[in-house]
Image (cartoon, helix red, strand yellow):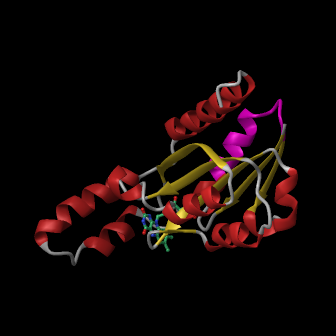
Amino acid sequence: MKIVMAYHTQTGNTKKIAETMKDALEEEDVTISSISEVDPSSLKSYDLAFLGTGIYGGLPGKTLKKLLRDASEIPPKIVLFYTHATADPKIYKKFLKRIRKRINEAGSMILDEFECLGDDPRLTLDEKLERVKDLPPDKQKAAEEAVKNLIGHPNTEDLESARYFVKSIIKRIKTGKL
Ligand SMILES: Cc1cc2nc3c(=O)[nH]c(=O)nc-3n(C[C@H](O)[C@H](O)[C@H](O)COP(=O)(O)O)c2cc1C
């Protein structure tokens, strides 16, 4: 099985998840790359693609959208993964809506999805708290909690979940369950 692991990252979190996933698939034939370096016409040569992105302004990275637009054919099996800063699943599950639509329209199957929180490693806690300090008092406490909740993600537990997730995908494919 030929696998590509391609990611869009701005601050490194999604890359970290991608590298962890690749590491967990050491026995498989996996090519890992930033999406911007993936030739869209090469995508069809893979049996399975792991496509990952951070979320920016409620949307996936532009290179992911572009890759799916420019590729004439995409692998039959796709796994999506994303890192974001939103605690509410009702909200974060919508971030990849258009990506899922494009994959479905191309006739490929999304086998599963992985997501986890991702903090901005470029800012200190004080700088992050400073950004929410002018919110109305009723919103400020929740925003401060959200900032604190993000600290350190993706953390060791997230990376372990990512590792477990990919191993389980491959196992399910090999046993005919996917
Ligand atoms: C410019 C920018 C905009 C962001 N917008 C959102 C957003 O709308 N919703 C969200 O849940 N997270 C948002 N985030 C948080 C990122 O999705 C999160 O930190 C993610 O892990 C970044 O992935 P990366 O490190 O691979 O770039 C934003 C981060 C940045 C830097």
Residue 39 appearing in the image: no
Q: From what the image shows, is residue 13 above or below residue 79?
A: below
Residue 13 placement: quadrant: bottom right
Q: From what the image shows, is residue 130 above or below residue 114?
A: below
- Name the quadrant of the N terminus: top right
Image coordinates of residue 49 in percent, x first then y, are: 73, 49
Q: Is residue 23 magenta?
A: yes
Residue at the outermost left position = 138
Q: Nearer the viewer, residue 18 or 149?
A: 18
Q: Which residues, given as a range, are shown in magenta? A: 16-29
Q: Residue at x 57, y 33 (%)?
A: 160
Q: Residue at x 50, y 35 (%)?
A: 157
How many labels sit on residues?
A: 0
Image coordinates of residue 148 in percent, x first then y, are: 33, 54
Residue 98 appearing in the image: yes
Q: Nearer the viewer, residue 94 or 52?
A: 94
Q: Nearer the viewer, residue 116 or 74?
A: 74
Residue 64 placement: quadrant: bottom right
Q: Is residue 54 left or right of residue 176?
A: left
Q: Residue at x 76, y 69 (%)?
A: 36
Q: Is residue 38 magenta?
A: no
